[in-house]
Image (cartoon, rainbow, N blue to C red):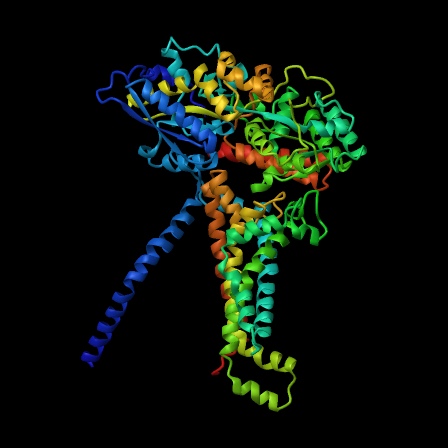
Amino acid sequence: MQRRFGRRVHEAALGYLLILPAIGAFGLFVFYPLVRTAYLGFYLAPPTPNLPSHYVGFHQYASVIGSSEFADDLGHTAFFVLLSVPLGIVIGLALANLAHTKVPGIRLFRTIYSSTVATSTAVASVIFFTLLNPQIGLLSYVFGKEGGNGILNNPHWALPAVALVTIWQNIGFTFILMSAALQSLPQEVLEASKVDGASAFVRFRQITLPLLSPILFFAGIIGVISGFQAFGQIDLLTQGGPNHASLVLIYDLYQQAFQYNNPGFAAVLSIALFVILLLLTFVQFWFFQRRVSYAND
Amino acid sequence: MLLPDTAVAARSKFPLGAAAKSSSKPVNITMWHAMTNANLTTLQGLTNAFNASQSNVKVNLVGQNSYTDTLTAYTTALSDPSKLPDLVQWETELIQLLIDSQSIVSVASAMAVDHAFSTKDFVPSMLNFFKVNGTQWALPFNISCQVVYYNETAFTKAGLDPSNPPTTLPKMHAAAAKIVQTGTAKYGMSLKLDNTDFEQWMALGGKDLINKNNGRTGRATAVSFDNALGRSIFGWWANMLKNNVAQSTSNSGSATYDNLLAIGSGIAPMTIDTSAALGTILQVLGSGQYANVKLGVGPMPWPGSKPSAGGGVFVGGAGLYIVKKPSQASQDAAWQFIKFLTEPASQATWSVGTGYVPVRKSAVTVPSLVQAWTAVPEYKVAYHQLLTSPPNAATAGAVTGAANELDTAILDGLTAMANGTPYAQALSQAASAGNAALSSYNERV
């Protein structure tokens, strides 16, 4: 009995020892900065770091989170995520489904569809910036908005345009995910349903989709988290404009920290973003956990 | 709380001559700057000349590529003062932020002991910008201002006098309308969505942008542009867009050249932009790509129907600041280099090589500059504008540590107006956002 207990402690100690490096790295690069950032929010930051800062406790947290500016930021971020994530997944899934055939030359299409994953956000943004230029941009003419202000300076269309760039970028990633998932589907289930006389549509809806649900769930979480943190395309396309129409939380954070030299304000936004994403992830896990069915259940 | 410089001077006199008396010569100093391309080449040339001309000081240039990057690097270095440079080229409008950082030595303290040096030959409006609360904090170095660029060929085609660009905003509207009416171009002019022109028109109208004499006799606590002059500027802008005689162009990224490109492509043959762009514009036109363009340059138009008393443009560009380093020799060395860069001969070389206007009145008699300006008289427009700008609080330009946020507030107002918001409302919106920015900054400093 004592020998078994001693071995358990020994195994536990070995376990902790093995994860210690990872914990150390996380602690140094994730947990410590997180705590320091929360702490930074308790101070009114001076315009330059060599000057004294004023301690205000929770006052800054209250005033920032209660402000209409924060509510607007959240609204824009939510709208942006709702636009870009579902569409990115749906289009990626549709293309993966279409490309999941044994037609000669399908490899070429698969390469094209997944190619957007190889472009960086900066490159994609610069390309779309040119395409959306009011004077010479192809997309401006396609959408009938050539000349004048342009789509990126239109308060109604600026955020959808930025979402478009994000969707285009996400398509490659979701296509690859969905393709891999489709290829790993158990073929005997699909063949059985074909024998039973199910149409392609019914097969897709009743069998393929549920079997894909873990991957869809994964893509959804990743999409939402990266959507909330989308920065590059906003910085290159609209800089939060026109008139804050595309000012998402992370861009406001960037402006406060680096353009207005107000790291205290930015720290509050940062913590708020962390809490929101944490809550959203819990919600997603709880909500979808019941609907996600795994193949070996 | 602005530290009066007299208190600083009383505590410690500027160590004039410390570089020459230093035990380890040459005194090596670092200058942070934001110059690139031709400007960098010219600056390097001047620096090499300085280093070769004497053995007390050796200047090492460190390029930060842009004013924004200089700001970031400098604020980071403030946490570790050993990383600060000895001398920094700093964007004009962020002057108050640098003063508030309490990390610079005013040139006034150097001038107080350097009796051989006089500011009489400096262009008053350029010197004035860098004077806050009675203290001359820096000397001007690379200066520019807004000018009107237009296509003389298009003017002739529209029946306008190509050698007389519009000198007032009402005349500008009329000229733009004529260009559209005669079918010469789709729009009369491009109006870049940027806060600079609005601020310049406030100064041209002789009115302060923010209170406390544009932030120069005390820390500004509120904006003062939500008045008749501000409304008339916004109203004019709104009318230009509503009547379709002007198009809006963007200031973001590469789109910032759209207003100039529109002159070349014939969409809108007139616009307003910085005089610092003149060199590049001439280079592009010289390539022969835009054979239909004969460039004309004119001064900024008055906001009213006639020149405003006490009105004038304020400077853009940057000034040179001495950083407060523990070494007395390096402070003196920085001062010696600043004096060199602002000498008439250096300014003439600088102006010829870059297109910035000289900060010294006697620089215009230096042969190289005379030659350059005879060949391209367009360079004289910006200089003349700044020379004739009467020195007062309005034409000195606004100073506040919240300059970036204030710029955004004004830009947001303009954007709202361009997208259909009634102009008076858009102006009030800009004013309240500006007030919020100022009070938030004052809370923190």
Of residues A77 and A16, the one nearer the viewer is: A77
Left or right of residue A165: residue B43: left
Left or right of residue B157: residue B248: left
Left or right of residue B432: residue B342: left
Give residue B150's position: percent from left, percent from top: 67, 28
Give residue B106's position: percent from left, percent from top: 41, 20
Give residue B53's position: percent from left, percent from top: 33, 18
Name of the residue lying farthest toward the bottom: A195
What residue sits 70% from the left and 26% below the top?
Answer: B152
What residue sits 21% from the left and 79% below the top?
Answer: A4
Q: Relative to A275, say whether B421 is above or below.
A: above
Q: Relative to A40, say whether A226 is above or below.
A: below
Of residues B330 and B143, the one nearer the viewer is: B143
Name of the residue lying farthest toward the left: A3
Q: Is residue A286 visible?
A: no
Q: Is residue B282 visible?
A: yes
Name of the residue lying farthest toward the right: B181
Say which quarter of the image contains residue B383: top right
* Viewport quadrant of the N terminus of chain B: top left
What residue sits 40% from the left and 17% below the top?
Answer: B339
Circle count: 0
Give residue B305's position: percent from left, percent from top: 74, 20
Q: Relative to B237, say whether A160 is above or below.
A: below
Name of the residue lying farthest toward the top: B115
